[in-house]
Each structure stands twice: as C-alpha cells, then as structure tokens.
Amino acid sequence: MPKLVLLRHGQSEWNQSNRFNGWIDTYLSATGKKQAQDAGQALLKQEIHFSRAYSSVLSRTIMTINRILDELGQSYIPLTKSWRLNERHYGILQGEDKDDMRAKYGKEQVQIWRRSYSVLPPKQPAYDPTVTIDGRTYPAFDHRYAQVPYGLLPLSENIQSTEVRVRPLFEEEIVPRLRAGEDVLIVAHGTSIRALTKLIEGLTPDQVTKVEIPNGEPIIYEFDKSLSVYKKEIVRSSVK
C-alpha cells in the first residue's frame, strides 16, 4: 500500500523570533536543523523507500528535506520544488512580530487572520522583491517565481486560497504517483499541510482550522487501493 509522508519544515529563524514568515525566505534555526535530522532518523526506522520528494521553493523546506534525505540515504531520488507548496502569504503581517500585531490589531482579530478558513489578512500593497527586517534583507518575490503567471502570485492568502493553490499539484502529480503504488515525501509549511490534510481526509472548513502542524513531525498516511486512508501515524519529535 502506498504511503505519503507530510512534514512541516524544522523551526525557522522567524519561528524562533516569533515573526510571521509567509513567503519571505528565511533559514532554519539551530533547533530546526536538529528537528530535520531527528525527523530523518525517525523515518529511517519506518523503512520507507521514497520514489519522489517534494518541497516548496522556500529555503526552510529545502534545507529540511535535504537533511532528511541525507539521513535516509536517499539523496538521489528526484526532488521537485514547487511554489504551490509555499506557506500562505500573510499579507501585511509578513515579517512582523506576532505580539506587536496582537497589540496593534487585537488578539482576536489576529487569530482570525491566522486561522480563519476564508478571512484574508489585509493585502500587501505591492510585490516587493525583498524585505528588510532589523537591517537584514530577505528575499520575498524574486527569480524563483519567474515562470509563475503574474496573476497567480498572492498578496494575501487564507487556508481556502492556499488549498486552491495546492490542489492542482496534489491532484495532478501526487495522486497519480500514489495510485501507481509509489511512496512520496512532502516537506512544506503549516498552512499548505493543513490544505493537504483537508484534501486527504475530507475535512470540513471548520475542522481544518483546528488542525495543529508542529515543526519537524512526520505525518505518515498509508492508503488502500482506492486511496482511502487506511492508517495515519504522527511521529512525535524529541527536539523542541
């Protein structure tokens, strides 16, 4: 029976410093690197041989998946990096300190922006190629999106719009591989994994808003011949 492993990247620098990440490209923290290694070691015990791996085009997932594949001794398998697996775009919240945003807009409003299925955070006014925070410049919209039609690039997203973005990749690439009996690894982000979870498990919009996706913990799905979920296992991380 085919298996699909979903995993949120290890802790990023901005997870650590309590900032909204979104599409801004940040690296793994020291803890995040350990979480990625730990996830790889945990998956090694599962004895899964992946046929294909997928990540977003953001460095925190690429760093995570490379460490995992190294631990598995499977660095040679094909790796597809897709913008469709990116984290949701947090609009004007991107790069901002979460506590500062709660103080400015109210705790309840910020939580609605973070977890509502259909409410969008206020949009960013423009597609800025970089963002400068505390004197350091981070990539935002750059050459990695050169082949993406302009109208598809977001200035704000919620779970619903992230699901719309993720769905074509899932239905056109992931599902056919699972139907062919292949085992697939996806390293993505909190919201893009929530969207995938909704598609896989048939969750309602209300249910998916309550799904928690910790950093660095593999979610292992095993499917029957009809691609119904036969078994689901979450491997808890020993690195916090």
Image (cartoon, rainbow, N blue to C red):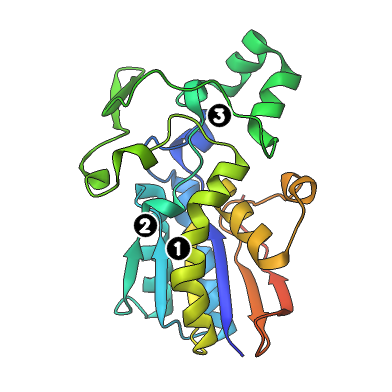
> What residue do we see at 41% from left, 37% from top?
23
Q: Are marks 3 and 2 in contact (CB under 8 Å)?
A: no
Q: How many angstroms separate mark 1 from mark 2 (CA)?
A: 8 Å
Q: Is residue 16 above or below residue 53?
A: above
Q: Are marks 1 and 2 in contact (CB under 8 Å)?
A: yes
Closer mark to the observer between disc 1 and disc 2: 1
Name the kind of residue labelled 2 in the image.
Ser
Q: Is residue 92 left or right of residue 211?
A: left
**Residue beneath disc 2:** 82
Specify few, some or many for label 1: CA neighbours under 10 Å numbering under 14, 14-19, or 20 or more. Answer: some
- The quadrant where residue 172 appears: bottom left
**Residue beneath disc 1:** 169
**Residue beneath disc 3:** 18
Q: Earlier in the sequence, mark 3 or mark 2?
A: 3
Q: Position of residue 232 (x, y in %)?
A: 72, 74
Question: Which residue is nearer to you in this view: 164 or 142?
Answer: 164
Specify few, some or many for label 3: CA neighbours under 10 Å numbering under 14, 14-19, or 20 or more. Answer: some
Closer mark to the observer between disc 3 and disc 2: 2
Q: Position of residue 199 (x, y in %)?
A: 64, 62
Name the kind of residue labelled 3 in the image.
Asn
Dot 1 falls on a residue whose secondary structure is: helix
Q: Earlier in the sequence, mark 1 or mark 2?
A: 2
User: Can residue 78 be seen in the rendering of this structure?
Assistant: yes
Q: Is residue 125 above or below residue 154?
A: above
